[in-house]
Image (spheres, coloured by chain):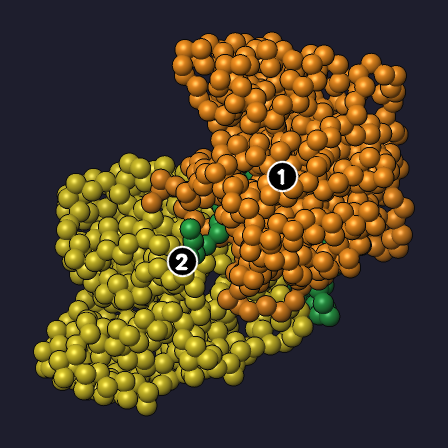
Chain colours: A yellow, B green, C orange
Amino acid sequence: MTDLHELSIAEAAPLIEARRLSPVELTEALLRRIEALEGRLHCFITRTPELALERARVAEVEIARGGWRGPLHGIPIGLKDIYDTAGIRTTGHSRHAEHRIPKADAAVTDRLAKAGTVLLGKLATHEFATGGPSFDLPWPPARNPWDTERFTGGSSSGSGAGVAAGLFAGAMGSDTGGSIRLPAAYCGVAGIKPTFGRVSRRGVIPLAWSFDSCGPLARTVEDSAILLQAIAGHDPADPASADVAVPDFRAGLRGGVAGLRIGWVRHFYEQDRPARPEVIAAMEEAAGVLRGLGAHVEEVRLPNLKAFQACYRIIAMTESFAVHEPAMTRHPAEFGEVTRYRVLPGAVLSAADYVQAQRYQRQLLADVLEVLRDHDAFITATTPGPAPKIESMRPEANFADPPLTAPFNVANCPALSLCNGFAEGLPLAMQVAGRPFDEALVLRVAYAYEQATPWHTRRPGIDAGGADPP
Amino acid sequence: MSEPHDPTLRAELEQLARLGDATLSAQQLDQLCEAYVYLEAMLGRIPRDRPWQDEPMNTFRFPKRGDER
Amino acid sequence: MTAATQHLTIAEAARRIQARQLSPVELTEAVLRWIEAANPQLDAFVTLLAERALDEARQAEREIGAGRYRGPLHGIPLGLKDIFNTAGVLTSGHSRVMMHNVPRQDATATARLREAGAILVGKLATHEFAHGGPSFDLPWPPARNPWHRDHFTGGSSSGSGAAVAAGMVLGALGSDTGGSIRTPAALSGVVGLKPTYGLVSRHGVITNSYTFDHVGPLAWTVEDAALLLQAIAGHDPRDPASAERPVADYRAALAGGIKGLRIGVLRHTFEQDLPVQAEMRAALEAALDVFRGLGAEVSDARMRPLHEYYAVKITIAEAELYAVHEGNLRTRVGDFGEDFLGRCLPACLIRGHDYVQAQRERRVILAEMEALYDRHDVLVTCGAAGPAPRLDAWRTIAFWQRPSLTTPFNVTGGPALTQCMGFSAAGLPLGLQIAGRPFADATVLRVAHAYEQATPWRRKRPPLEPGAPFSRQLPPVPDPATAEATPAQRDRIAMFVRRAGLTLSERHFEQLCASAPYLEAMLGGLRKERDWGLEPANVFSFPRGAV
C-alpha cells in the first residue's frame, strides 16, 4: 500500500468500506504526519487528536458492524477556523475570538460529522477570513508546502496547505472573493466554490453575506465532488440557502467534455490583469487539452475585471465593516493590522455607494448569464502567477489588483480552481466556472482536464525536510 | 506610501473613520489614506446614473412557512 | 348632474354593466362630466385622458354587447397615480425631472387593469416621486382634500385618495412605501390597502424604495378594494421581489364575519409613541366596540415603539431613493422640489454600514412579529395621528421629527388597510388601520368589510360644490427649518455633501442641517452589537430563468 497520507478520499473509502483500512490506522498516520510537519506549515489553530482518534474508533466499530455510511466514513478532515464546532474553540484566527467556544456546530460541521468524517482540527485562515497574511495575530499564517517561504493564498490558508502537504485529504474553506480558489491555486490542489446558496452558511463566521460561500478543498476533483455531496442541500436556517435539488456530483464526473461549449475568458489575465507568460502558456495548453478531449473552446468576453472588482469590493467592504463595526471601533487593538487595513475603509463608503454597487451587481450578473446561455462553462486563470514570497506581500496589493476570482463571486456562480502547470516549481492554476447550480458540469470539465494531465500527481517537496519558518 | 496625502482628504477620512470611541493612530490613518486611493478608483467605476428600473441585486422575500395556506 | 352615477361603487356599477342596465360609455361620460366640474377645486389629475377613456368605454361596451364580459372591472373608470407607467401617456412622477417622460410600455399593474377591461380616466397627482409632502414648487399643484379643500389629502397617493373620495374615479391604484396608500385613504375617507410585499408587481412603477415599495388599491368600499386587488395580485417574473404564491379569492373571503377573530389593539402606538388627537382616539375606541359587537375578541397587543420601525425604514428607504436619483441630484438638483430634497438629501449622511445594520435589524423585527401573528389574527391602530391638517401647515422637518403609524407595516411587509371610522367635528374623515400576517390580505379585508358593513360612514360623500367661488392660490413654499447645528457640525455635513458630489443652495443646505440631527440619532440607534449570523433581510437570489 502507498503511504496512507497519499490516499485520496476516493481511494481510501473502498478500502475502509472493505475493512482493509482502519480509520484509526489512517487517522494515526495523519496525526503523525501533522506532528512531523506542522512546525513548518502552521496549518492548525487547534488540533483535536484525541477527538479524532475517538471518532475514528467509533467509525471503525460502526463499519465493522456493517454500518458504513458512505465515502466519507472514517475519513480525516480539517475545518477552516471559521466553522463553528460545538465545544471546540472557533477563533476566526483572531485575538478578538481567541477563547470563543461555540455551543452548536455549523451546518457543514454537522453534515460532515453525520457523514462519518474524523475532525483533525481547526485550520489557519486570515483573520476573520479577510486580513492576511498577518504576523501580529496569536497564531502565525500557514506556509506553502511547495516552498515555506511562499504564501499559501488565502483566506482558506491552512486548508490549502494541509491538503497539499497530505495532512488530510480534504478540508473545508470558504470563498467570498476567492478564498477557496486562491489557496487551492497557490498550493496546487482543487478547490470549489459552489453556487451561492448551495451550501448552508449557518454557523460560519461571515465576511460578507452577499458573497460568502462554503466549499471543500481536496487534492482531486473526485474528492471535491465527494465532499460537496455531503455538504450541499437546502437549510432553512440559512436565509440565502436555495431550495434546489442536489444531483449526484460523482455520478456525472466521467461524462467527458466532448461537444461542450467552453468560453475562454482570456482578457481577464491577458489584458485586465496581465499574468506572467507561464500562466498564459499554461492556459493555452489547457485550452488545447480540452479541445483535444472534444470540447469547443472559444474566446468570450465578460465585463472588465476591474468592473467586477469594484462591485465586489464595495459590497464586501461595506458588509464586512458592518460585521465588525462595533468591535473594531471599541477594541481596535484586538484586530491585526492587515485586518484593520482591509476592513476600516468600509467606514467611508456611503449607503448610495452600496446600493449602486448592488444595482451594478445585477447588471454584471446578467452579463455573465448572457454569455452562459451559449456556453456551458468558462475557463480562465486563477492567479496571475505562482505564490509570491510571504514576506513580500503588502496589504494594498489586495486593493490595487483586481482578483481573477471575484467575477464568479459577483455572479455567485460555481467556480473551481485546479492545477494546470508549474512555474519555478510552484503550481499554477485554472478556474472552471459554470451556470448557477451546475456544479456537476464544472466538476465534469475539471475532472476531464485533471485526468488528461499529470499535474494532480505531483507532490510538494515538504517531506524532503527544510528549516522551520522563523 | 511615502507621498503625502491631500490634507483635506486626510481630515475627511479621519472624520469618517471615527465611529464610537476609537481614534486612529497616525499610522492607521496613513494606511487608510493609502487604501482610499484604490477605493476611490473603484468608486469611480460604479455607475451612478442608471434607469430607476435597475434593482439592487439583493431583494426582500418572505421565507416560505410550513403552515401556509 | 346625476351624482348617483359616478358615486356608484365598482361592485354596483359592475352588476349593472354586466346586466346591461348601465353602459360603460354612459358611466364614463358621467365621470368625465363630474371631473370637469369638480377637479378644478381638487387638482387630483396630472393628466386627464377624456378622449381615450371614451374610446376605451366604447370598446368595453362593444365587447360586453358581444357577450365578452371580462369581469367586475370591465367598463369601470379608474385612475392611476402618476408613477405607474402607461404606454404612450405621460408618466411624470409629479416631478419637473420627468415632466416629459412618456413610457413605451405599461406597468404590470396598468396592463392587468387593462386586461380586466378597466377604463383609464387619467393619471393622478402624487407627491414628487411618491415621496415628499404637499409641494407648492412643482409643475402641478398638490391635490386638495375633497372634504375640505384647504386641507391636505395625505400622500403620496394624493390624487388617488382625492379622486376616489370625490367620485371622480370609482377606484385607483396607489403605492405605499411608508404609508402612501393608507395615509391618503385615512385623510380622504376612503379604503386603501397596502397588500403584502411581493403580492402585487412593482414592475413599471417608478421606484421610491426597492425594499419597501408596495402597489395597491384605493376605493370607496372594502369590496371594491378587494376587486381591484384581485385584478393586480399575482406573480410577475419581471419584478424580482414578486412572490410565487397562490392568489386568494378576495371578494369571496369578505363573507363570514369576524366572530371569534382575535383583534390585537396596538394601544401604545397611538397612546404613547405618537399620541393621537382626542377625537381620533374616541373614534378608535368606538371602532373597538363595533368589533366586540361583531363577536371579535379584542385585546391589547404590543410591538416595538414606532420610532424603531421608522429608523429602519428611513435608513433603508432614503438611501435607496437617493441612489435612484443620484445622477440627477448631482447634475440638476434645482429641478426637484424643496420638500422632496428635504427628505432625500440627508441620505448623503447615511453610510453603507448604516444601511446594512438597518437591514439586519429588519430581520430581527420580522422574527419578532411571528409571536404577534400567533396571538392575533389582525392588529389595529389609527390610520393617522388626526384628521387632515391644512395644506399650509406642512413642514418638511416634521418628516424627520416624528414617526408614523403606517410605517411599521412597510417594515413587516404584511398587509395593512386603512378605512374611514368616523369624522372629526370639522367634518374631516378619521382613519382606522388594520394590519395582518404576510399573505393574510384576505383576513384583513374581511375584518375591514365587517366593520364597514356595521357602520354608517360609507353613506356620506364629500360636500363638493362645483362652481362655488374658490381660490386656487397655493400657500408659499415654507422656509427651511432653523438649523441649530454648530459650525463644526455644519462643516461635517458640508463634507458629506461634497463627498456625495452635490452642489446645494443655501436653502437646501439649511434644511439638510436641520434634518441631520434627527437622522443621525436614528443611525446611532442602529449601531449596536449583533450576532454574526444575523444577516440583512434582503438576500441574493438568482433572477428567475437563470436556474
Residue C150 in percent (x, y) is at: 85, 29
Identified by mark 2, the residue type is Gly
Chain bearing tag 1 is: C
Q: Which is closer to the viewer, label 2 or label 1?
A: 1
Q: Can residue C300 be seen in this view?
A: yes
Residue C154, above or below C279: above
State the residue at coordinates (73%, 70%): B21
Q: Can residue A351 be seen in this view?
A: no
Which quadrant of the structure image shows residue C144? top right
Residue A407 in percent (x, y) is at: 42, 49
State the residue at coordinates (35%, 54%): A243
Q: Are marks 2 and 1 on the same chain?
A: no
Q: Could you tell whether B23 is left or right of C16 in the image?
A: right
Residue B66: image tag: 2
Pick the front one: A218 or C86? C86
**Location of mark 1 (residue):** C453
| Mark 2 residue element | loop
> Badge 1: how crowded within 10 Å, few (<14), some, or many (20+)?
few
User: How far apart are the two marked residues, 2 and 1, measured between alpha carbons?
Assistant: 34 Å
Pick the front one: B11 or C452? C452
Residue C334 in percent (x, y) is at: 77, 30
